[in-house]
């Protein structure tokens, strides 16, 4: 086995970025993808756009075309990933699932749906949001209405005229709530367990650019919290308590570091909350027949529930036996770092960044290339 063969698991933006950078540095990357190129993006809801500006979202070696506009759409991302593969002439093997990665005396062996594959190094890029979390509310199996995971939501057309409870006020839940209102749903409730931090996509300093500036100047977590709080107050985003949404208990940067939660980048939710067309409500405690019981004891009778309660990385079957995942199932190393017990095994795309993940993919890919040079 040559020392230049690198297996890349996942043909999303992270895995393709790593493959392109490694190929340019003289390695032989082979990309394995269980679906199609950009499979995760193909399955997202229709109205999804990147929350990072186009020119801050480029992958290494090929820019998004200006025709995609300021905020690149879901379909624009998929088309660009396909162009990216062709542009860099990457060896991408679609329809091949990697099921397990094991050490060998010379490197690594991948057990795939198409057989075994030996590589000198491995880059895992299966995605931060790979496996949607299923709700486990008591009474779930007795609820007569429709319950859908946010990961399976496409658009609001099926919910026109129906009362809908969206559970989870992350970026996905907030945008789905907007989509439902615009599609003509009846009542739209938005349930939260912990009040989120809010910011706007089109403010004077877009959140990704602010994140870049904070990191460039080595700003502390405390300074970042104070600056973001000032911008939230200036934008009237710090307290929507009169509409049922209290302020977040922690600052933006602290929440990202401590809880691994990025702020909600508003694309229309806040005006609809102020117009009382979206109603924030407390967390779901249980379901009793057709009623949803909330943490404050109040009850709702929605026709449908859309559960946006998070994602898991789903890395346990692949690398869980290597003792390199923490208690949350996330890798203990990122980018160009490799664990002592797993040399030349790298991870791309498992770190939340307010500066935007697409931009970070390139940095992590270059860090891996530098690390391999000295491996």
Image (cartoon, rainbow, N blue to C red):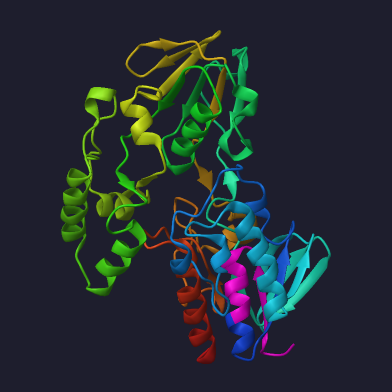
Q: Is residue 177 visible?
A: yes
Percent coordinates x, y for residue 150 in the rendering: 56, 36
Q: Is residue 103 visible?
A: no
Q: Is residue 154 left or right of residue 298?
A: right
Q: Is residue 340 above or below residue 237?
A: below
Q: Is residue 347 above or below residue 155?
A: below
Q: Quadrant of the N terminus?
A: bottom right
Hey, which residue is sitting farthest right in the picture? 114
Residue 171 in which image quadrant: top left
Percent coordinates x, y for residue 224 in the rendering: 21, 59
Residue 105 in which image quadrant: bottom right
Q: Residue at x 63, y 28 (%)?
A: 157
Q: Residue at x 48, y 64 (%)?
A: 54
The residue stretch that appears in magenta: 1-20
Q: Is residue 278 above or below residue 43?
A: above
Residue 13 belongs to magenta span: yes
């Amino acid at each position: 086995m040559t020392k230049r063969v690198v297996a890349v698991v996942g043909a999303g933006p992270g895995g393709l970025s790593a493959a392109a950078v490694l190929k340019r540095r003289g390695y032989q990357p082979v990309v394995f993808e269980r679906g199609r190129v950009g499979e995760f993006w193909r399955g997202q809801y229709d109205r999804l756009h990147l929350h990072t500006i186009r020119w801050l979202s480029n992958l290494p070696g090929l820019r998004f075309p200006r025709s995609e506009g300021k905020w690149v759409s879901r379909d624009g991302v998929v088309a660009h990933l396909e162009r990216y593969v062709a542009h860099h002439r990457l060896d991408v093997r679609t329809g091949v699932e990697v099921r397990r990665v094991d050490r060998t005396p010379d490197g690594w062996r991948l057990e795939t749906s198409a057989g075994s594959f030996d590589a000198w190094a491995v880059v895992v890029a299966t995605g931060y949001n790979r496996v949607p979390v299923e709700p486990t509310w008591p009474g779930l199996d007795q609820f007569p209405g429709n319950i859908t995971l946010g990961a399976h939501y496409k658009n609001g057309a099926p919910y026109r005229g129906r009362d809908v409870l969206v559970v989870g006020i992350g970026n996905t839940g907030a945008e789905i709530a907007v989509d439902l209102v615009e599609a003509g749903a009846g009542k739209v409730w938005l349930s939260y367990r912990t009040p989120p931090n809010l910011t706007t996509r089109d403010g004077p300093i877009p959140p990704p650019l602010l994140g870049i500036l904070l990191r460039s100047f080595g700003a502390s977590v405390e300074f970042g919290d104070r600056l973001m709080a000032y911008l939230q107050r200036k934008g009237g985003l710090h307290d929507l308590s009169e509409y049922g949404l209290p302020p977040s208990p922690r600052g933006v940067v602290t929440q990202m570091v401590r809880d691994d939660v990025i702020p909600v980048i508003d694309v229309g939710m806040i005006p609809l909350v102020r117009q009382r067309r979206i109603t924030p409500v407390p967390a779901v405690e249980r379901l009793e027949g057709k009623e949803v019981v909330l943490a404050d004891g109040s009850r709702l009778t929605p026709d449908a529930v859309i559960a946006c309660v998070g994602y898991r990385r789903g890395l346990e079957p692949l690398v869980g036996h290597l003792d390199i995942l923490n208690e949350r199932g996330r890798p203990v190393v990122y980018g160009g770092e490799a664990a002592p017990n797993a040399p030349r095994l790298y991870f791309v795309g498992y770190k939340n960044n307010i500066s935007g993940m697409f931009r970070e993919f390139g940095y992590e890919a270059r860090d891996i290339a530098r690390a391999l040079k000295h491996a």
